[in-house]
Amino acid sequence: MQRAAQREVGVPPTPFRQWGSAQSAPRAKRLNRVLVGAAAVPMVFLAAACSSSDSGSGSGDGAQQTATAGAQGSTSPSASPTVQAAAYAELPEACRVLSDKTLGDLVPKGAKSAKQGSSSDLSTRAGCSWSSLDNNGVKGSQFRWLNVSLLRFESDASRGTGEKQAQEFYQRQVDDARSVPDAKNTKAEPLSGTGDEATVVRYDLKKKEGAFKQQTVVARVENVVVTLDYNGAGLAGDSTPDADGLVKSAEKAAKEAVTAVAKANGAAGDGSAPSASSSPSATKSPGKPASPSASASASEPAAKG
């Protein structure tokens, strides 16, 4: 009876309302979830597209940076200027460039008086001198002085090839020999058969000790310059030596010194350049480059100054 009263008081639901209200509520919820899910899908796609676009843009930047870095890395720096390697890498021992016979002819009383010049690097600069005094008592004496100087030039990018530097120094040595103060009867002549080029300069020089006959032979073989000074004088009343004889002796000694330079570098005995197998490589630098302004003489000639 109580349940009937309750039904009477309340509005009894019709079968349609029961289906519509009781069944449609869960369906509406499901539909809302579907719609919400459907609306979320474009957002996911949109987010993915943005993410993909960002990722692609980053990849492009990275690829461009990598390509740029690769291009920069593949661009090698400009090559350093190079010059042809010097033909000769060594100098002979200066005090042994002349044979005992030659020394006996030029300095008969001083063949064993060799005095090596000072040098910080014997592979680029060397020299040796000899002196001879043949004392004839009251008849006076004959004096001879001989000096051999060797200067080697190494190829250098800023200075040029060793041969070019040697050519320039060779010319300066010839000019210096021709312009000695107080020299008289100066003559300069080319000398053939001695290295690549050679000049002999002769002059007279009056000193308090006597009248000196001076001979200077300057020769160049490849990147080495040989300067040979030879003078003689009759002292204490002895006769002045024959200048022509002194010149011939100096020329002979200069040729011998040039040949010694070639042999020291494995070349033929005629002073020609070494073969390719014996020539130093472009990277080899056995010694410090000789300064073009440096004097080749180990000591000053006795007849000079």
Image (cartoon, helix red, strand yellow):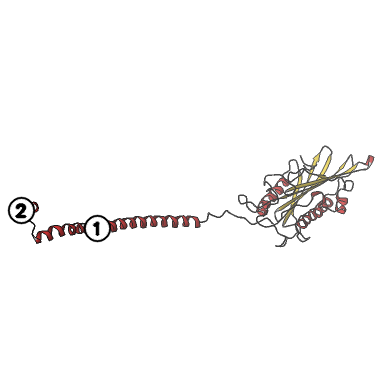
In-front residue for pair 9/290: 9
Q: Position of residue 4 (x, y in %)?
A: 7, 54
In-front residue for pair 71/30: 30
Q: Is residue 253 left or right of residue 58?
A: right
Mark closest to the chain's N terminus, 1 or 2 = 2
In-front residue for pair 161/90: 90
Q: Position of residue 6 (x, y in %)?
A: 8, 51
Q: For the residue marked with disc 1, what is the amino acid?
A: Gly
- Kindly give the residue lying farthest to the top in the view shown: 208
User: What residue do we see at 16% from left, 57% from top?
Assistant: 25
Disc 2 crowd rating (10 Å Cα; few below 14, some 14-19, many 20+) is few
- Kindly give the residue lying farthest to the front in the view shown: 1
Disc 1 crowd rating (10 Å Cα; few below 14, some 14-19, many 20+) is few
- Determine whether the residue tagged by mark 2 lies in a helix, strand or loop: helix
Residue underneath mark 1: 37
Q: Nearer the viewer, mark 1 or mark 2?
A: 2
User: What residue do we see at 46% from left, 55% from top?
Assistant: 69
Q: For the residue marked with disc 2, what is the amino acid?
A: Glu
User: CA–CA distance between discs 1 and 2?
Assistant: 44 Å
- Quarter holding the C terminus is top right
Q: Position of residue 298 (x, y in %)?
A: 76, 44
In-front residue for pair 80/52: 52
- Determine whether the residue tagged by mark 1 lies in a helix, strand or loop: helix
Q: Identify the mark at residue 84; answer none if there is no mark.
A: none
User: What residue do we see at 88% from left, 54% from top?
Assistant: 101
Q: Identify the mark at residue 8; answer none if there is no mark.
A: 2
